[in-house]
Amino acid sequence: MERSSSSEGGGSVQRLGEFLVSIGAMSDEQVQQVLQEQQNSPDKLFGQIAIEMGFIDDAAVDRYLQQK
């Protein structure tokens, strides 16, 4: 979810971590912790790691997906 920085289709795509910070669901520090863990587990998605670390729940990821 957080991996791609390209904006396909010409539109600007807000990354999951940025979205979660913007709605107050995560702090910048928590996003950095998830990104660090993602480097150790590149097969896991940002949202999956954030949920496993207890920073967010499925509802926060669903909110992100609905706004896309």
Image (cartoon, grey):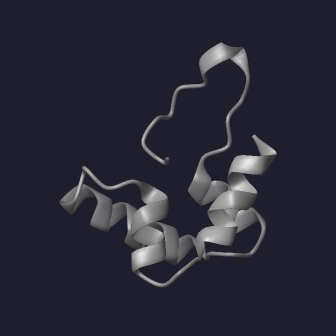
Residue extending farthest to the left is 40
Image quadrant for the C terminus? top right
Residue 23 in percent (x, y) is at: 78, 68
In the depicted structure, whether residue 59 falls above or below residue 64 = below
Residue drawn where x is 50% and y is 68% of the image = 31
Q: Nearer the viewer, residue 20 or 58?
A: 58
Quadrant of the rendered image containing residue 45: bottom left
Residue drawn at 69 percent across, 49 percent down:
65
- Viewer-proximal residue among 36 and 44: 44
Residue 12 vs residue 51, the one in the foreground:
51
Q: Which residue is located at x 70 percent, y 15 percent?
A: 10
Is 40 displayed left or right of 5 in the figure?
left
In the image, residue 11 sits, relative to residue 67, either above or below, namely above
Q: How many marks?
A: 0
In the drawing, does residue 26 fall left or right of residue 37?
right
Furthest residue in direction top, as rendered = 9
> Is 27 displayed left or right of 49 in the figure?
right
Q: Position of residue 46 (x, y in %)?
A: 44, 58
Question: Where 27 sits versus 66, above or below?
Answer: below
Residue 9 position within the rendered picture, expressed as x and y whole percent measured from the top left: 67, 15
Q: What residue lies at 22% left-to-right and 59% top-to-bottom?
A: 41
Residue 56 versus residue 62 in the image, above or below: below
